[in-house]
Image (tube, helix red, strand yellow):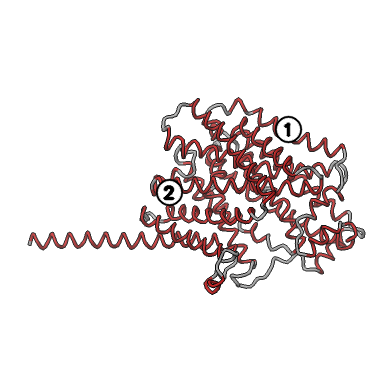
Amino acid sequence: MHQFAVADIVVLVTYLLGVVGLGVWFFRKSRNPEGYMAASRSMPGWVVGLSIFGTYVSSISFLALPGKAFSSDWNALAFSFSLPLAAWVATIWFVPYYREGDAVSAYQHLEQRFGVWARTYAATCYLLTQVARMGSVMYLLALPLHQLLGWNVPALILVTGGLTTLYTLLGGIEGVIWTDALQSIVLATGAVACAIILPMTMPDGASQMLEIATNHDKFSLGSMGFSLSQPTFWVVLIYGMFINLQNFGIDQSYVQRYIAAKSDADARKSVWIGALVYVPISIIFLWIGTALFSYYYVQPDLLPESLQAEIAEGKGDGVFPYFIVDGLPTGVSGLLVAAIFAAAMSTLSTSLNGAATLTLTDYYRRFIRPHASERESMVVLYVSTMAWGVIGTTTAIAMIEVQSILDAWWQLAGIFSGGMLGLFLLGMLSRKAGNAAAVVGVILGVAVILWMTLSRTEIWPDGWVTIASPFNNYLVIVFGTLTILLVGWLLAHVFARAVAKDATGDTDTASDEQT
């Protein structure tokens, strides 16, 4: 373990104080519900776009993409390739859809379409996934920082959760968006700096890095086969399309940003900025992982034995954090750690504000006090922001003792996400689909998601191996979403034909009686 230099600590502390200070600065603009939840619908598109990008790149992405490229290849880039198409769909259908009325909740539209059960179901799914997301992000942020700095894991979680909750509480959505934009610049700057420095540190120059990487097929995009049981290029591409449709189409965190934009044009611009900035940054992350492979391939003695053992098992996530402190110049290490914090805090603040907004709009105003005053609404927003901050932080701390809970949370998040996306698409694409068709579609869709998820775990009985899912786990959300959409659509058309037939029969009977 290497200790931070004074310059690194100064860079990190300056960043943390700047982020909290920026949140406090917007306190005066977020003292009413409209300002707190929608920034009074006044935000410029470029700021909202950087905020979307910052939300998209969590600490998981910041550390996992280089680790993925280090251990294997650039197969993960197929996910990024799906972003422009998902962004195009969002700008054509989703952005106008959400900006038509004055609703701040993404799920109020579901109540108008299918009833209160659909709105409550979707809002509950969102809140559960955000708890999973906040816990996972804070936990996975604390682990590498503990390894490279030696700081206490619970303390890291508490500092991250406490500071993020504080500036989210004070700044509202406007503070969140502006701090996300700042954090986006910090994390992008850190990634670019590392990507430039790494090849220059190779013993024989940048050409050596490229030669080693090429000889080991590190730039491969993965198998181009059509197997559905392996994470081929096509499987990852399809998975990315559905995940990105979910993010841009139904995630309250993104929808709230569309609403906060000052015009439809700015909302559409924000989607394109968020999507198109992520693509080159994801390439940079993969480049870093590949460069690290070459760097330590020619200098394996620079890695501690513990990391060498992890690499031998195919785990490369710990290499980048180690290099940040061990291999980067003083000051740059602090910038990269600040970038990791930025990636985590931008995601956390978004989750907190979205969860507080839904607590007020989809639960308190919907079921308890429909005509709550402005003052009362602000109290609910403040209290719920703090409450969700505590819940997310507690979840992260719980993961210290029960590390398998991380995989369990991710599986549950996949279950909820698939059900939500299918329900939204059914409501948008089928005008004939009613409440009954939606209920049956969701039940069968979630059943498919559960089957595909659980049959690949130890929970699945040994005697049921023959009926276990043969598909790769990336396809869970794909099959679950399509099941809800297709079953709901078919049932809607069957019901419509049955009703039409009954109506025709009644008309014929009435005509015969008149005759």
Task: Mark 2: give few (<14), some (14-19) or many (20+) Cα within 10 Å.
Answer: many
Closer to viewer: mark 1 or mark 2: 2
Q: Nearer the viewer, residue 151 or 206?
A: 151
475 is higher (above) or lower (below) than 280: below
Label 2 amino acid? Ala
Q: Nearer the viewer, residue 260 or 168?
A: 168
Q: Quadrant location of residue 387?
A: top right
Q: Which residue of the protein is positioned furthest toward the right in this rendering?
A: 203
The location of residue 276, given as percent across then percent down, is: 65, 51
Distance from label 1 to label 2 (Cα)? 41 Å
Disc count in the image? 2
Q: Secondary structure at mark 2?
A: helix
296 is higher (above) or lower (below) than 177: below
The location of residue 359, given as percent across then percent down, is: 51, 38
The location of residue 248, given as percent across then percent down, is: 56, 49
User: Tag 2 or tag 1, which sits nearer the N-term?
Assistant: 1
**Residue 315 falls left or right of residue 257:** right
Label 1 amino acid? Gly
What residue did someone put label 1 on? 18
What residue did someone put label 2 on? 118
